[in-house]
Image (tube, rainbow, N blue to C red):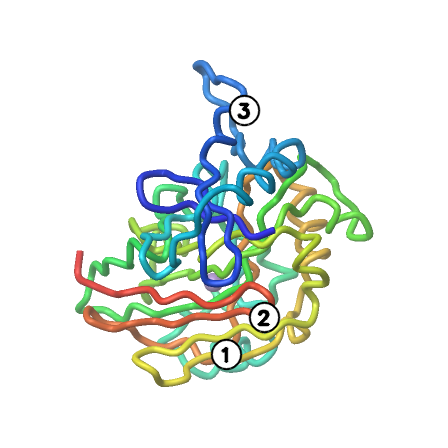
Amino acid sequence: MRLCRFDDQRLGLVRGELVHDVSAALERLPAVRYPLPSYDPLVAALPQLRQEIEILGKSAKGRPLSAVKLLSPVANPGKIIAAPVNYRKHLEEALADKGIHHGKLVDEIHKIGMFLKATSSLVGPGEGVRLVKTERRNDHEVELAVVIGREGRNIPKAKALEHVAGYCIGLDITIRGPEERSLRKSVDSYSVLGPWLVTADEFGDPSNVQVGIKVNGALRQDANTSDLVMPIPELIEYMSAFYSLRPGDVIMTGTPQGVGPIRPGDSMEAWIDRVGAMTVAVSAA
Ligand code: MN
């Protein structure tokens, strides 16, 4: 199943090039009261809602995907967790180029672990990236994004994929410079998730998928998750030893070699096997 969010907070079932409005399924979500839950209610309820979404999708007229504004498929992640340098060739590239990472920040992922991005940085492909600090280098990073479906702590890697709701394309936009990653990567619109969530049952094995991005038609990154230093089950085991993972939490699994600058006016086209492709415009904030 492919689920998107679009236009004015609508929920869509994606089939081919069409989106079917299944927003009526949102009426089935439990009413929430203050304090709000620290997870995404839709992702948490997905197992119970799937059948209804399928039924609604059959009767809803399809609209061309090109005619809607795609939002982040996850509305309320409790956290956005990101892996630093997690592809072998990107580690070599980063060590060779002081413009990409600064000194001691580059190290094996097993030593430095993960970092967090502000949830306020999250947008969908239809909203675009709005750059700040344009006098400095702002880079694209395309990544396979994992959305957690089931709560867990101390999840062993053998069971890790049972906690995954689905997969998306993630863009981890970054201002280069000496500040902490969490600051440089948390600017409004610097986390892009889209174009839709492909549920784990449809996506299958994440260990051998191609991940790529073009900027203005020129190929920048093109790699395979088989080159990940810490594969997805190990990432989940590692991070869940520190914090609970909850439905809707987003994991950006790291970017491969080929990161490069983007500027206002650019157009990014990113793709991942078995997810699809998305186009994201870059402007000045
Ligand atoms: Mn990244």
Cβ at disc 3 under 8 Å from ligand 1: no
Residue 231: quadrant of the picture: bottom right
Q: Amino acid at mark 3?
A: Arg
Q: Amino acid at mark 1?
A: Gln
Label 2 vs 1, first from the N-terminus: 1
Q: Is residue 214 above or below residue 143?
A: below
Q: Is residue 227 left or right of residue 157?
A: left
The spot of residue 184 in percent (x, y) is 34, 56
Q: Measure the alpha-carbon separation of dots 2 and 1.
A: 18 Å
Circle 2 packing at 10 Å, graded few (<14), some (14-19), many (20+), is some
The spot of residue 56 in percent (x, y) is 54, 38
Q: Residue at x 36, y 85 (%)?
A: 218
Cβ at disc 2 under 8 Å from ligand 1: no
Looking at the image, which is closer to me, 252 or 238? 252
Q: In which quadrant is the C terminus drawn?
A: bottom left
Q: Residue at x 66, y 69 (%)?
A: 229
Q: Is residue 219 left or right of residue 110?
A: left
Q: Is residue 94 left or right of residue 223?
A: left
Which residue is under mark 3?
Answer: 28
Q: Is residue 200 left or right of residue 56?
A: right
Of labels 2 and 1, the one closer to you: 2
Q: Circle 1 — which element? A: loop
User: Is the Cβ of the residue at disc 2 closer than 8 Å to that at disc 1?
Assistant: no
Circle 3 packing at 10 Å, graded few (<14), some (14-19), many (20+), is few
Of labels 2 and 3, the one closer to you: 3
Q: Circle 2 — which element? A: loop
Which residue is under mark 1?
Answer: 257
